[in-house]
Amino acid sequence: MSISTPTQPCGATLSPRVTGYGLFILTLVYAFNFVDRQILVILQEPIKVEMALSDAQLGLLSGFSFALVYITAGIPIAYWADRSNRRNIIAAALTVWSGMTALSGLAQNYSQLLLARIGVGIGEAGGSPPAHSMISDYYPPARRGTALAIYSTGVHVGILLGFVLGGLLAQAYGWRVAFMGVGLPGIVLAVIMVLTVREPPRGRWETAAQAAYKPDWKETLAALSSYRSFRYLALAGGLTAFVGYGSGNFAPSFMVRNHGFEMGEVGIILAVFGGGGGMLGTFLGGFLADKMGVRDKRWYLWVPAISGALTLPLGFPYLLSHDTTVVIGFMFVVTIMINTYLGPLLAISHTLVPPAMRSLTSAVLFFVLNIIGLGLGPLTTGLLSDFYLPYFGPDSLRYAMLTTGVIGSPAVLFYFLAARHLPEDLANSVAHRGAA
C-alpha cells in the first residue's frame, strides 16, 4: 500500500498571519515554561544558603523530582491532546505551572519548595507535546524542522529572561519575590492565548484518510517501538539533554563559586551568552536540517551528530580555564553546538507518524529526554560535585560538570545509528498512517 503526501492541505486554509501569530504565541508560552522551570537554577545559591542544602539536594530539586512528575503526567495529557482541543489544554497547563511558580516563593522549607516544584512539573507536562502537534498542522513537512526549531528557541528565551529577571529581582528583593514576579504573568498569557490563537485542523497536510486515522495509545507505542531510528534518536537526545541540563543547571553556581561573579552579573552573562547561544544553536539545527534534508532525510540526525562531536573538546577550555573571557567565549560556542538537536529530532519523529500520533510521540520523546537529561543530569552533577569535594575543594563542581560531558558523549554514536536505520523506517512508516 502506498500513501502519498499531498502538496496542498486537506484541511482549511490558514493565512500566514494566522500561522505566524500562532507560532509566536506558542513560542512565547514555551519561553514562560522555561522561565518558570529554570528560575530555580539562578536562585539556587541563596536558597542553598537559607535552607542549608547540599548540591545533591539542589540537583534533586531542579532535576529529578521535576522530571519525574513531568514525564509521568506528560504521556496521558499528550494522548488527550491527540483527541481534544490542543490550544485549551496548553492554556490550562500554563495557568497551573505559573500559579505553582508563584507559590514557590511562599515555601518555608525544602519539603514545601519540593512540592511546589512538583506542581510546576505537572502543569508544564501539558505544554510542549500539544504545541508540537499544532505546529505540525500549521506548517508543511518541508518547513516543519525550522518551525519546530523556532518554537524550541523558547527554551532559551525563557532561560535568558529567567536569568536576567531572576538574578536582578533576587539581588534587589530576594528569591521569594523573584518566584512571584515571573510566575503571575503566565496566567495573563493563558487568557490571551484562549482568546486569540486559532486551533489548526488536525492532519492539515495529510490525506483525508491519514487525518481521520485515530490510533489508540497502544498502537502509537507499538509503532514507535518498531522504529529502530526512533529508539536510537531518543537515546541520543536523552544523552545530549543529560549534558545540557547536567552542566547548564549548575552554570550559575559555577560562575559564582569559581569565577567570583555576583548574582546579577551571572544572570546577564548567562542570558546573553548562554540564552543567546542556545537560541542560535536551536534555530540553526532546524534550519540546516530542513535545507539539507531535502536531499537526504538523514541530515535531521547528522546535524546534531556533527555538533555533538564538537561539543566535548570545546567544553574543556570552558570548564578548565581560569580566564573569564575564555570561559564566557567557549561557553557561548558550546551552547550553540549542544542545542542543535531538538528541532531536527522533533521534525523527523513527526514525519514517522500520522497526525493523531504526534502529541503522544512528542511526549514519548520528551519522556526519554527528560528522564535521562533533566532527571539524571543535574542529580549526577550534584552527586559528583559532593563526591569530588574532599579531593578538589572549590573546583569540585568544575570537574563534576566535565565528567557529565564525558558520560553523555556516546550520544554521537547513537545519532549515527539512528541515521543508519532511518531510510528503512521511513519507507515502512506508511503502515501506521491509516488506509488510503
Image (tube, helix red, strand yellow):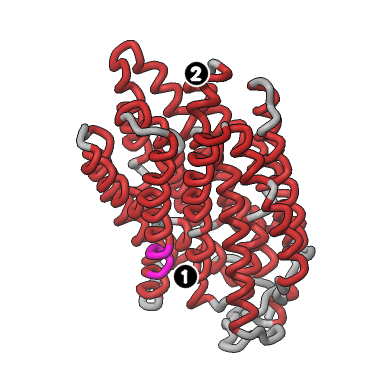
Q: Position of residue 236 (x, y in %)?
A: 43, 48
- Can you tell which quarter of the image residue 136 is in? bottom right
Point out residue 351 in the picture as x, y percentages from the top left corner: 54, 68
Q: Quadrant of the N terminus?
A: bottom right
Q: Left or right: where does residue 326 sit relative to residue 245?
A: left
At x 71%, y 36%, the residue is 103
Give the farthest residue toward the top: 390
SS class of the residue under badge 1? Answer: helix
Q: Residue at x 28, y 35 (%)?
A: 319
| Image quarter in which the C terminus is found | bottom right
Q: Main secondary structure of the magenta part?
A: helix
**Number of the label disc, if any, that sits on residue 146:** 1
Question: What are the residue bounds of the magenta stretch?
Answer: 283-287
Q: Earlier in the sequence, mark 1 or mark 2?
A: 2
The answer to whether residue 22 shows anywhere in this view is: yes
Please state which amino acid type lies under the numbered disc 1: Thr
Question: Tag 2's secondary structure?
Answer: loop
Q: Which mark is residue 54?
A: 2
Q: Is residue 284 magenta?
A: yes
The residue lying at 66 percent from left, 54 percent from top is 127
Instruction: Check the image and report above or below for 24 versus 360.
Output: below
Amino acid at dot 2:
Ser
Asked whether the viewer can see residue 431, the reply is no
Q: Nearer the viewer, residue 60 or 251?
A: 251
Residue 173 on image: x %, y %: 57, 34
